[in-house]
């Protein structure tokens, strides 16, 4: 009898423990926050990268998504606290303007969805409003005709393709200063040499095409000229506008400029201004991403990579009226995590500094280029263009 009473008492005490533990667990969740209470980067089935957030959540892209990089790994000193605050205010202003305009935001079952990228749009007259090919919950995007480069509707047709198209990689387009180090000298092509290179390229029957032309061929088999070549410039130096742009324009040639968005926002005198970039875009050039601050994207956590991918994307989209689709990895450094984040943000391809001219649909984020150096004379350039590599 006593044994039954003791057993019953122990059973009741054990049962009482469960509500207590459950209450403690619920308290811990309320203090720490339930999983998923913040914004989350998602890649939708139709290829749209969005951030989802609960009702009343105010979305502000993080200004610092990882510990501040050291001076050694950046081309510049770290930003001061006041500069960071200024940048945060700028991002808030942009988001407020977009929310007031009803762009990039929709409501679905009590959850606010913020578009972080313009949806794919059909090719058409740039004087017309472009409607987004997106779920009906997304608001059609109004575009500025005078600030729009050709827009594309690209989707892979399932056909495996490989193509040899040289993608030339330039940096500075100027004579290096007398005290320039070996790197600055090597990366500098003089305007005179560049003009001779362009003349020789045309004399050999090459036609400049855009990265969109290249990808349209890989994804959909779109035709290319008999001898296509792509010209790219990394970093977005101002001499690209002052020296390269006039030489290309007078020959009817185009190029892609990979820009460092924070440097342009800071109005650094050695880099392009946004007004210069818009003028180049109006002439058929493409303005694409080279990250926010030219810091390596290799061995970085996901939060930092999201900050880089979305920060540069949204800045270019806001300033140019059309979103970028390509990333050139700063210093050519990247890894699988880099590719995963940029792909989830609906970039279409990534360009490396790996030498070569053959591209495959299998690895769109490991595309090769051909480096043009200070010493690359026209004969040598044609030799590189004709290599089967």
Image (tube, rainbow, N blue to C red):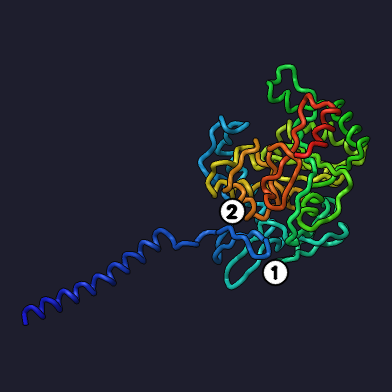
Outermost residue, left direction? Answer: 2
Mark 2 or 1, nearer chain start: 2
In front of the other: 80 or 170 = 170
Q: Quadrant of residue 34?
A: bottom left
Give coordinates of residue 308: x percent, y percent: 62, 46
Q: Is residue 84 left or right of residue 234?
A: left
Mark 1 closeness class: few <14, some 14–19, many ≥20 residues within 10 Å = few
Seen in the image, is 287 located left or right of residue 282? left
Circle 2 SS class:
loop
Residue at 57 percent of width and 49 percent of height: 62
In this rendering, is residue 365 above or below 5? above
Q: Is residue 342 above or below residue 236?
A: below
Disc 2: which residue: 60
Image quadrant holding the C terminus, namely: top right
Q: Is residue 215 visible?
A: yes
Residue 190 image point, x, y percent? 82, 26
Find the residue positioned furthest to the front.
388
| Residue linked to disc 1 | 135
């Amino acid at each position: 009898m006593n044994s039954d009473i003791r057993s019953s008492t122990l059973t009741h005490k054990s049962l009482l423990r469960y509500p207590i533990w459950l209450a403690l667990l619920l308290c811990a969740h309320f203090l720490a926050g339930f999983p998923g209470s913040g914004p989350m980067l998602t890649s939708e089935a139709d290829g749209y990268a969005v951030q989802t957030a609960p009702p009343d959540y105010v979305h502000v892209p993080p200004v610092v998504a990882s510990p501040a990089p050291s001076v050694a790994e950046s081309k510049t000193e770290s930003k001061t606290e006041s500069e960071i605050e200024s940048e945060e205010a700028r991002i808030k202003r942009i988001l407020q303007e977009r929310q007031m305009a009803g762009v990039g935001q929709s409501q679905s079952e009590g959850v606010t969805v913020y578009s972080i990228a313009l949806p794919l749009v059909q090719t058409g007259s740039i004087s017309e409003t472009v409607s987004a090919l997106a779920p009906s919950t997304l608001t059609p995007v109004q575009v500025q005709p005078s600030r729009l480069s050709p827009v594309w509707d690209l989707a892979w047709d399932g056909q495996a393709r490989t193509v040899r198209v040289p993608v030339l990689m330039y940096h500075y387009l100027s004579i290096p200063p007398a005290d320039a180090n070996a790197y600055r000298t090597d990366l500098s092509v003089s305007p005179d040499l560049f003009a001779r290179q362009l003349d020789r390229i045309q004399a050999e029957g090459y036609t400049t095409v855009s990265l969109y032309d290249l990808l349209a061929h890989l994804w959909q088999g779109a035709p290319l000229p008999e001898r296509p070549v792509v010209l790219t410039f990394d970093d977005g130096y101002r001499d690209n506008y002052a020296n390269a742009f006039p030489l290309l324009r007078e020959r009817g040639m185009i190029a892609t400029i990979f820009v460092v968005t924070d440097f342009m926002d800071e109005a650094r005198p050695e880099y392009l201004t946004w007004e210069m970039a818009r003028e180049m875009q109006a002439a058929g050039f493409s303005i694409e991403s080279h990250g926010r601050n030219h810091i390596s994207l290799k061995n970085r956590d996901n939060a930092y990579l999201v900050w880089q991918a979305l920060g540069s994307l949204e800045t270019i989209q806001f300033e140019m009226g059309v979103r970028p689709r390509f990333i050139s990895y700063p210093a050519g450094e990247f890894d699988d995590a880099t590719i995963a984040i940029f792909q989830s943000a609906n970039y279409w391809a990534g360009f490396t500094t790996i030498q070569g001219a053959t591209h495959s649909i299998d690895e769109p984020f490991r595309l090769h280029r051909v480096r043009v150096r200070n010493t690359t004379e026209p004969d040598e350039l044609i030799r590189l263009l004709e290599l089967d590599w």
